[in-house]
Image: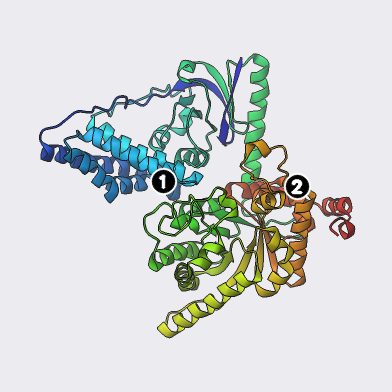
Amino acid sequence: MKELFGKGVSNGIGIGKIMFFKNTLLDIPDYEIDNIESELDRYHSSMELAKTQLGEIYDNACKRVTKDESVIFKTHIMILEDSKFVSLVETGIGKHKNAEAAVYDASIKLANMFKSIDDDYFRARCNDIIDASHILLHILQKKNEPTYQIDENDPVIVAATDLFPSDTISFREDHLLGFVTNDGSQNSHTSILAMTMGIPSVIQIHEPLAGLNGRMAIIDGMLGKIIIDPDINTLALYQGKRDRYIKQQQRLRNQIGLPPKTKSGQYIRLSADIGRLEDISKAKANDSDGIGIYRSEMLFMSRENCPDENEQYDTYSTLLRAFADKDVVICTINGGSGKGMDYIDIPHEKNPALGFKGIRISLENPELLRTQLRALYRASVHGKLSILLPMISSMEEIEYVMREIDKVRHALDLEGIQYSDNVRIGVLIETPAAALISDEICKKVDFITIGTDNLTQYTLAMDRDNQKLADFYRPYHHAIRRLVKFCIDSAHKNNKTVAICGQLASDTASTVHFLTFKVDELIMIPSNILKIKAAVRETTSEDITNTRNLYDLNSYFL
């Protein structure tokens, strides 16, 4: 028996034999061609076939996952049609390269551009570029034969060096027990598809997987563990775990449609933290009370030009229409160094977390701020909009934005453009400075949201991504809870609402504490909403009383 460890990206337990999946695209031919026009024709006709094939994959995906998850395959078509990609391929062929080599070189160049961006989401898009180009390369090389064989009566754990979204969706769910790969990322569309399909998945296993073909194994997506050739006792143990997990998932699904109220009737809003329009369906599927944070910087990242007012308006309008009867909070741009926004003068920084980011970018680029505010106010007629200002550290920053809002509203009035008069303005409390003046902030704005991840790392002076600090980084530190409680009290004294986002909002161990503090809202990634709802609904008045007594709230936070 042998245990291999990686990173779990889709929960669940699978028990069965391993089938190693090998992509048939092995060697890319690289040779000099004589007839450039003929090779260009071969490339363009193959690209049309690839687009048709991707359309068929999209239709198939829509039958198995939501349209929002399936849209990646339409994105693949857009990648093949992208002017930069086409230009790179045609330039390569123009230098007498064969089409396969030109396509491969173009895809690697574009993928490396994304890989250089200091953001997990955009680094994960490298695979989408490679996947789209591989489908085109399969057609150019006429390699359309099946790359795997599965016995319909014997589902398997699929192991691979890496899997692309088109590979993942090609397997029938009733033939699958799990996915295991050497490469991959938590934000990749392959991981997203695995989560959507409910297939256990573990990535970043640092040992070769090809030699495991046909071996019995257990995949534990929660612990990111693979057990090879388990003994009888281990098999029995994991069979019990698998059965309990299935029951737990059913219990969570039973939460859909139920209000997030404690047994004593205390209500707390549970909303989604998203960064892409594709996440709308996840928020709805997990019974979100609305959007607690839409991170608008995702719209600005990894592109050559800043999105104009109309593009921003279209995005914000789509989001607001999707939740027309629920609150939608859109955070203004919160990018920074290494976020792929070269059209903004953002210097390279040794420590971007303490640098030019958040509201500081908007203040230094007033036209950028005005354009975003115009788009937001124009879109406000389509739903219940709130605007959140990130990385605030002084009252002067808030007052500046308020003046800009007045100017934008006045300009829209002069142009006869409608907007809602009920747009709420809030502040994202992420710095100790903002937390300590939260009583003043709450007199100026309509609500506050406490970003516990940044607040923790700035208060403790520790980078939360630094593995060397893992034993020292404590989000439950007494100082953090004092700051959080002070912010909550500041909001409620001024009759303003307060929300919590970040790691602590998704931690069931913290749920009773936030209920005790009478937080109005918890914001989390969609997949955690039902888990937190279950924790809320199981909380009793006695639990809250015991927590209050534990802290002795009248003295603990003084």
Task: Name the mark on residue 487.
Answer: none
In the foreground, 355 or 555: 355
Assess disc 2: are there few (<14), some (14-19) or many (≥20) residues with their C-alpha within 10 Å of its C-alpha: few
Query: Which residue was labeled with disc 2?
Result: 476
Q: What x and y, as percent, mark residue 111? A: 38, 41
Three-letter code for the amino acid on which mark 2 is drawn: Tyr
| Neighbourhood count class around disc 1 (C-alpha, 10 Å): few under 14, some 14–19, many 20 upward | many
Closer to the eye: label 1 or 2:
2
Q: Which of 289 and 113 is in front in this view?
A: 113
Residue 378 appears left or right of 466:
left
Residue at the bottom extreme? Answer: 414
Indicate the position of residue 9 as horizontal and vertical percent values. Answer: 55, 37
Residue found 14% across the figure and 32% down from its top: 33
Residue picked out by circle 1: 70
Mark 1 or 2 closer to N-term?
1
Residue 216, above or below 131:
above
Q: Where is residue 503 in the image (x, y as percent from the top left)?
A: 66, 48
Tell me the quarter of the picture where residue 259 sits. bottom right
